[in-house]
Image (cartoon, rainbow, N blue to C red):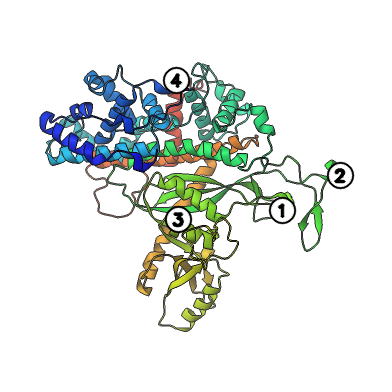
Amino acid sequence: MPTDSLPDPSKLKAQATTLLDIHENVSKVIGELDLPLEDLSDEYRESNKSDKTFDFDAMLRVFLYKDVGQFSQKEVAKRLHNWPYLQVRFGLDRAPTQPAISHTKKRRFSRHLRSFITEVADRIRAAAETQGIRDSDIASPQQGRNPGPEEVAESNTPLYKYVDRHAPEVITEFQSEVTTAFDTGRASNAKHSDEAIWEQQTLMSLMDRSGTRAAHRTFNKFQRDPVHHDTHTRAVKQLGTPNTYQFTLDEFASTGWNQTPTPQWRRVTETIQEQFTDAVDQLLGSVRTSEMFSEPVVAAIDVTTVPFHVTPYKGEEDIGPDDQQIVVNEKTGRTRVPKDDYPEMVNGGKEKGVYGYQYATLTIVGRNVPIVVAVEPVRHASTWEGEDGDSVSWAETVDRLMEQATDLVDIHLVMADKAFDQPGVFHVLDQCHEVDYLIPKQTNSDHLREQAEEVRTDAAVTARVEQAASLYLRDGTPYIDTDTDPTVGADGYSHDVTFMHVPAERDDWIVRHQDDTGYALFATNREDVSPLDAEGLTNRYSERWDIEIEYRMIQPLLPSIASTDYRMRLFSFVFSCLLYNVWRAVDHSLKELASEALEDYGRTSSEERLDPVLPLADFLASSLIVTFAGGLDPPDPA
């Protein structure tokens, strides 16, 4: 639904303001609003009747109520169940469950409609506050009242005991919220629900066991109604199969990746990304109302590799007389024969004989809770593919990451690894997404050599700034069409770049001078950066190292799987990122709860993010307990 086709939110605010004068009750106002249904589109498909379980008008009012009160989906479902009068006011014939609310948001509300609902809700909340209305339906706990005996006792509880007490319930809430975003599309009467599939996937990650039949047998020993390995595999593959393709799984597996204009790996990626985005959206909805979270955010982009320990080349005994030889070493002329069925999305690593699936991620960093908000596969042509190899430029990778991320959060600064020191990347960030960037130049940069000499020979100069350096896109720049892109001038000019040559300490992105002084060159599109400002700006780059810590924590959550089906591989990585996000969100929520309940926690004015109160190891242990309690029989004691 195009944004310009939506009604004017101010008209609904005016209507709500008038109704507030009459009722002084927000839920009554929402129930009596005259919604412009003719201008709001229900996205449900006739082919899936289950999508229209509840009336569209009623669910619009439910989401207005949710956003006005800034409730989670679980809290709204609880209120609708406990207070039947809300069902009557909103036109419901029964109380929807939390999964039904999530299903409505994902399947029936477009992104533009969701934004419209949020904007209308914000205006209704502002109108209520202006009129001094503290409705019991939406009011926050009153401030300044005298605490009761139980609250006094709670405030004296040690932090670790408070966390231990509340962690299971918070983990349960977040897990139930995010997993509903993934939909296998199987029949509603399937023996095992989607919830059981995601429980199994979670266990595979939390127990650090391989995704093999042996691992499933281990899990199934403790289950009352075990999910068979083949059932789990089919469900995940079905989740990753684009719904625009009506072929069977066997046909899907045998379809040539390069036989269509859009490769199948791209269609699989977009299918899984859409559901991951919905899950992250729900997580952010739970943390963004906190005083500990603020927008616009700082984001970091980097790439990680999941090793694949299989050579792309045939052994001597497998080579046939008609097999095509590929030159693998230009200097020596050495040739080898590539395998016919080697996974397309495996890239060659920097080291000889190292192969793996690569993924770029965009993560919120800085003072905010670090959340992975976008995942994009990296596709680079490899030697063994010969002339048939296909590459996706870094510029396109960054553009796709930003498209996903900016649907969820407002970004004002992007920091990336020096691998993204590309003119096309600079252009995409500045011209296509209009955000500031801070990216270190590669050490072989001409700018770096020239400015290093100047700073080294002048003892009075500690930092040098070159402003308004023109960025021109070279002919043939991947992904950027200088002929048709309106943001590119006729001469290929894109925008002005500022180069900052500053002292640095990290050996992996600096050049070290003869006197052992380290300097680095950064590129940014910020204007009017003085030498005095340069060090402060580039020091922010240290915030990017959140993403390095992130990768070290996500990798252990990846269950090793034997399948080379890309649906399984990509989903495995995406789901592990989501588990990492759940941990971060749970820890964030526990900090927020602790700061409200405990007198001596979180009261400082520090701009630094508070240390985790729930270490990852404790989160994994608590999650296992929650999962076992939810559907598994614990193993017999030794």
Residue 41 visible in the snapshot: yes
Residue located at (54% from left, 65% from top): 473
- Circle 3 residue: 432
- 386 above or below 81? below
Alpha carbon separation for disc pair 1 and 4: 49 Å
Q: What residue type is labelled 3?
A: Cys
Dot in front, 3 or 1: 3
Q: Which amino acid does label 4 sit on?
A: Lys
Question: x%, y% of residue 594?
Answer: 28, 40
The front one of 208 and 389 is 389
Figure label count: 4
Q: Distance between the residues labelled 4 and 2?
A: 54 Å
The residue where tag 2 is placed is: 322
Local packing at callout 1 (Cα closer than 10 Å; few below 14, some 14-19, many 20+) is: some
Q: Mark 4 points at which residue?
A: 49
Q: Is residue 394 left or right of residue 530?
A: right
Q: Distance between the residues labelled 1 and 2?
A: 20 Å
Q: In the rendered structure, which amino acid carries the disc numbered 1?
A: Thr
Does label 4 or label 2 sit earlier along the sequence? 4
The local secondary structure at tag 4 comes to helix
Residue 620 placement (x, y as % from top left)? 46, 35
**Mark 2 crowdedness (10 Å alpha carbons): few <14, some 14-19, many ≥20:** few
Question: Which residue lies under the disc numbered 1?
Answer: 383
Badge nearest the viewer, 4 or 2: 4
Q: Earlier in the sequence, mark 4 or mark 3?
A: 4
Give the residue drawn at x 49%, y 27%. 199
- Inspect the image, locate mark 2, and give the three-letter code of the amino acid beneath it: Asp
Indicate which label's residue lies in the foreground, 3 or 2: 3
